[in-house]
Amino acid sequence: MNAAQIAQKAEGLGPWFQNLDLCGVATAPGHFLGDYPADKFARFAHLVPEDLTGKSVLDIGCNAGFYSFEMRRRGAARVLGIDTDARYLAQARFAAEVLDMSGVEFRQTGVYDVGALGERFDLVIFMGVLYHLRHPLLALDLIREHVADDLMLFQTLTRGPDSVAVQAPDYDFSEDAHFQRPDWPRMAFVEHEWAHDWTNWWVPNRAGVEAMLRASGFAVESGPADEVYLCRTAEVPFAKYGPHAVYPSQGDAAR
Ligand SMILES: C[S@@+](CC[C@H](N)C(=O)[O-])C[C@H]1O[C@@H](n2cnc3c(N)ncnc32)[C@H](O)[C@@H]1O
């Protein structure tokens, strides 16, 4: 396929969210974040193991496949990209063909259905999806339970301070001051739209992101760099967390 044919096909598959370089043809040259995601990747690429030889990768919310292709370039033996949007998957499949990316598979399914994949992965990529979900903690729990075997590369939109409040293990019922702190773990709920996009549901602060990761069984290994974390699977720190938590009956719980 020559450049004119690639450009024509790419235009027919548009609009693109990710700006891929398809043999000199840029798929989203006017992206509001610049050369996205290449510019972003350059700011956090050092978090990702450079050599993924023989590893398996699951890219959840893969879009047009930018991160799937980058992980394959780092030597991953198997890369599966999943997304709920068929239009993005058509872009990803076309890009794989142009870039001659064998070993990368794309499948239409969503994060709530990762259990049905029946497979665990050395590296799960979960970038730019959490804030689009109505049930973000459920998604993290499902990833931890069913597909994450070791590492997770994670990003979510965040707003608020960079500082993280130190949390006491417990607080008295009447204490309120900690709730007023902007660096207390919190997540803003988007009832209508955010950034002209009704698919946005939640905007956490940094403390909220890190607390949710811990609560779902992910230890932050490095980051954040440009909102991106490299996490490793870990035990959930308290019995109340995780899909198998057993809650005390109301009479047993301290109120
Ligand atoms: C903001 S884009 C991020 C794309 C890519 N991961 C990145 O960081 O550039 C969000 C992507 O998540 C996909 N998505 C939304 N809800 C999803 C779900 N429940 N399961 C899997 N993917 C989903 C969208 O179709 C879209 O491709």
Image: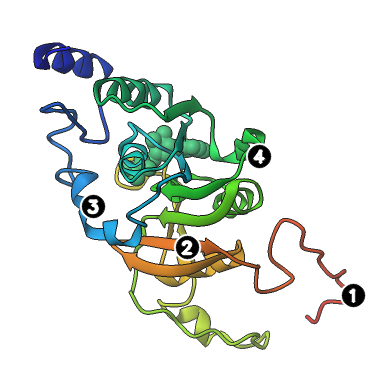
**Does residue 186 appear in the picture of this structure?**
no
Within the displayed image, which quadrant is ligand 1 positioned in?
A: top left
Can you tell which quarter of the image residue 49 is in?
Answer: bottom left
**Does residue 4 appear in the picture of this structure?**
yes
Q: How many marks?
A: 4
The residue shown at (24%, 21%) is 98
| Spatial separation of the CA atoms under disc 1 and disc 2 | 37 Å
| Spatial separation of the CA atoms under disc 4 and disc 2 | 20 Å
| Spatial separation of the CA atoms under disc 1 and disc 4 | 35 Å
Depth order, front residue of 251/107: 107
Task: Tell me which label, 3 or 2, sits earlier in the chain.
Answer: 3
Question: In this rendering, is residue 122 above or below 183?
Answer: above
Secondary structure of the residue carrying numbered label 2: strand
| Spatial separation of the CA atoms under disc 1 and disc 3 | 50 Å
Write down the residue under mark 2. 231
Check disc 1 and give the amino acid type: Gly
Q: Position of residue 95 (x, y in %)?
A: 28, 25
Asked if residue 44 lies left or right of residue 241, the reply is left
Check disc 4 and give the amino acid type: Gly
Secondary structure of the residue carrying numbered label 3: helix
Which quarter of the image is occupied by the C terminus? bottom right
Q: Are marks 4 and 2 in contact (CB under 8 Å)?
A: no
Q: Nearer the viewer, mark 1 or mark 2?
A: 2
Task: Tell me which label, 4 or 2, sits earlier in the chain.
Answer: 4
Q: Nearer the viewer, mark 3 or mark 2?
A: 2
